[in-house]
Each structure stands twice: as C-alpha cells, then as structure tokens.
Image (spheres, rainbow, N blue to C red):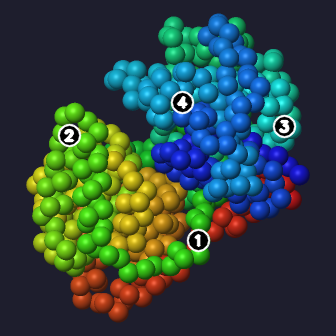
Amino acid sequence: MTHILMVAAENGALPGGKVGGIGDVVREVPTALAQRDCAVSVVTPAYGVFHRLPGAQRLPGLKVNFGGTAHSLDLFRLDGIESSPAVRHYVIEHPLFSSCGAGRIYCDDPPGHPFETDASKFALFCLGVAEGISKGSFEAVDALHLHDWHAAFLLILRRYDPSFRALQSLRCVYSIHNLAIQGIRPFGGNDSSLERWYPGLKYDRRTLADPQWSDCVNPVAAAIRMADAVHTVSPSYAKEILLPSDPAHGFFGGERLENDLRDASEQKRLFGILNGCEYPQGSAPKAGDWPALLRQMRKLVLRWASRDRALASAHFIAHHALQRLTDERPAMILTSVGRVTGQKVGLMREPTSSGQAALHAALEALGDDGVMLMVGSGDSDYEQFLCESAAIYDNFVFLRGFSDQIADSLYRQGDLFFMPSSFEPCGISQMLALRAGQPCLVHWVGGLRDTIVDNRTGFVFTGKNPTEQADALVATLQRALTQHRKQSAKWRNMRKAAAAARFTWSDSIDAYLRQLYRIE
C-alpha cells in the first residue's frame, strides 16, 4: 500500500485549520485517496492550538539545527478526527509557529517586509518534516505531496541538505493553489533568509533564484524546477499560467514563472486536475428561512464587534445595514463568499467605461428590491472599499470576517452567486453554490471556466482589458436580473441544472493516482 504524506499550511479537517482552498483540498483529497487503498498522512504546524485537541498523542520529538541554533520540535498524532477517520493527522509544535497569536495560520507583516514572519515559520516547519521523515516519525513514506509555497522549502532540503538525501528516493508532487503568492525572501543578509535559516547549506543559486530578483530565493520557482510532478487545480489554469501575465489587459498568467512552467510542461511534469467537491446525502437544495438568516447575521456581527475594545467601522456599518432589512425576503439575493483580495475583489473596484466602480454599477442595477450579501476578510484596502460601498448603498451588506455557518446559509439561500475573480486557479465557492442550487455569475477564467456553463448553470463574462471586463460584469448581471424577473421558468431550470452539476473527487483521484503519484 502506497503511503502518501501531505505537507501543508492548512488542514480543513481540523477545527480552525482552514483559511482558503488549500484547507478544503487537504481535508477532502486524503479521504478520497484512502478510499482507493492508499495510506495517507497529513502534517501541518500546530500554531499553538492543534496539539491541544482531544485525542492528541505526543510522539518522540524532533531535534533540528535552525538558524545556527539547536531547536526541539514537538510532534503529535491527532486521533479521533471525525471528518477523516481513515487519514492519519500530525501536527508539529514550536513557539515560532504561533508568533502572531495562537491559532493564527498566516501573519500580516508590515509593508516592506513581505512574508518575513511566515517564511521563517514555514522554513522551520519544513525542516521538522524532513527530520521526521528521515527518522521514521510518520512511518515509511513512499510519496510526498507539498501544497503551495509554505511546503516548498522541503524540496530545497531534499535536493541540497546531505542529511536528507534519502528523501530523493520519494516521488515528490508540488501543488500550486495560488501562483500569485510566492513567499519570496532574500538569500542572505536578513534574519528571515535562506542562509540564516539553513547556515552552511551548499546550493545552486540559479535553481532557487527568483527570475526577476536574483538576490532572492523564490520557493515556488524552486519547487516548479525540482518537483517530480507539478500540479495545478484546474485544466484551464494549467494552460493560462504558461503565458506571461499582462495586468494592464486584465490577464494574470504565469506571474513571472511562465518560463519555468513551460519547461515543466515540455518535460511532461505539469498537470492540471480539477478540484472536486463533496456531495453528502442531504445536500440537495432546501427552501431558505430568510428571517432566520437575518437573525443569524445580526448576532454574528454583534459577536465580532464585541471582540475589540473599539468598535470597528466595518461592524458598525454592517449592523446598521442589517437593521434596515425586514423579515420580508428581498426579490433577489446576490451572494458572495471568499477572501477579500485583489484576485477576488479587484474587478469589483475596477472603473467601468463611465468611471463608476463595477460594484457600484452592479448595485444600482440590482435596485431597491434586491440585496447583495458578502462575507469575507483579507486585504485592508479592499475591505475599506467594501465598507465605504456598504455605507453608500442600502442594498449592500458586507460582513467583514468569516463564518462557515453563515457561508453555508448564503449558499443555500442566495439567488445568484457573485464570483468575478480576476483569475481563479480553481475555486470551491462556485461549486458549493451550485451544489445548493444557486446559479453563479463568474469571470470566464481558470477553474470558473471549467465549472460554469453560460446560460445553463450561470452567467459568464470576459473582456480584453479591465475596463471591458468591468463593463461586461455589469452587463452580465443585468442579463441575469432580466431572466430572474421575466423568465421564471427558465430561471427554475437553471437552478435545477446548477444543483445537478457534479465535480466529484472520484474522477480527479483517478488522475492523481495515474499522473501525480504514478500509481496504476
């Protein structure tokens, strides 16, 4: 039986272990692989909390030399994880892993210090994983599956640290979940740099260097160059990243790594496999209870507001917006769930040809009988844009934060899911909305292109530049609103088609086994 060890920053099988799509994949793929007679283990940092979960079993610790100093890492196996009982879950604990607060997976460093804290954290984590594999802490491993830049340092250690040469016999898969975030740090001259983390490491600078900043290590570039298989989470995105990015024309391709990705493609190491979605029994669409959702959102905003001594403007504005809504369900509920980043929100802020922000034009098209409900957090500049928009438009509610319960309610109760991403490696939100019978309005890129069929399960738009895309977004919403208001039978058929759409892990796992792990 092949034993696959997955290494990631997130694990959605653990309470609080998910921030984005990585967490979903790391929760669902191991279970699907276990059903195909693979032994699967997952290891993440404990972040000061996961090692305290019920059923955590302390294992022999790991001794490493990091930054020229001896460090002890605590290793735990987590038993009794109900969401994936067939999978072995491990966490590694060290004070550095909770340096921005217990339970915080990612840190927000000040301007001018990108990835400084997280890079050191994950460089130590990968060193601990390498030591654990060498010492047999995870039992015999046959293949490594590394997720995004946080786990890429393991490939550097595998190639260049003599202590871990045994790892070179393991097939190593590298998954790209978001190519735009690369974890770039200096080679030296900084406390958070490759030569400070791993002093004395003899490495080939060209293999690890960023293609633009030669004095910096780019863990994503290094992983693409050194992995046995490079995996993206949708077929369309695997094609898009072979082309140069051109933000001026609204295209986000290889993010300066297109040459390395083309090399991987020509060497037949690059594979685009669509993420799947779980379809549990009882997930069929159900009639929503609008007054209950309204009460749920009001309570959530008050709870968020109570956490800080000073009332955040985002919560103040959301509270007032929710108070304006009545128990009478709006004629149209537009929903949006996701991280507040340039990728997800950039097009909403983009000016249309009239100079108006696309979101504002969309809200005016939605009108007084509709409401847009959005939940998410992330980039402070985009959060501010959304807060200001919610203060201007009575039909827009922005909940700054995240709640699985609220997200699930929005999927089930919305009429149209709004996901105009500038680029999208795959996306899970649109699949969850479809599963609940909610058509989606999306930009025709990446995984959205692979999952939404225009005028059947949703509405798609595109454009040759950001202004055209902003105009097309608004025009497409107007098209959707017209259908919803005037063609009720067609809309009902679209909801049925959305609910019937299937993107199962079973199909994707076939490709994982054959292409990524080379298991027939």
Mark 2: amino acid:
Ala
User: Circle 2 is placed at which residue position?
Assistant: 312
Query: Percent position (x, y) of residue 513?
Result: 78, 56
Image position of 492 (left or right of 197): left
| Alpha carbons under labels 3 and 1: distance apart | 32 Å
Identify the residue at image location x=34%, y=61%: 336
Which numbered disc flags the more N-terminal residue, 2 or 1? 1
Which numbered disc flags the more N-terminal residue, 4 or 3? 4
At numbered mark 1, what does the secondary structure look like: helix, strand or loop?
loop
Estimate how packed mark 4 is, as few (under 14), some (14 to 19) or many (20 or more) residues with alpha carbons within 10 Å.
many
Estimate how packed mark 2 is, as few (under 14), some (14 to 19) or many (20 or more) residues with alpha carbons within 10 Å.
some
| Alpha carbons under labels 4 and 3: distance apart | 24 Å
The circle drawn on residue 377 is none
Which numbered disc flags the more N-terminal residue, 2 or 3? 3
User: Circle 3 is placed at which residue position?
Assistant: 139
Which numbered disc flags the more N-terminal residue, 3 or 1? 3
At numbered mark 4, what does the secondary structure look like: helix, strand or loop?
loop
Q: Is residue 418 above or below residue 342?
A: below
Which numbered disc flags the more N-terminal residue, 1 or 4? 4
Eye-nearest disc, 4 or 3: 4
At numbered mark 3, what does the secondary structure look like: helix, strand or loop?
loop
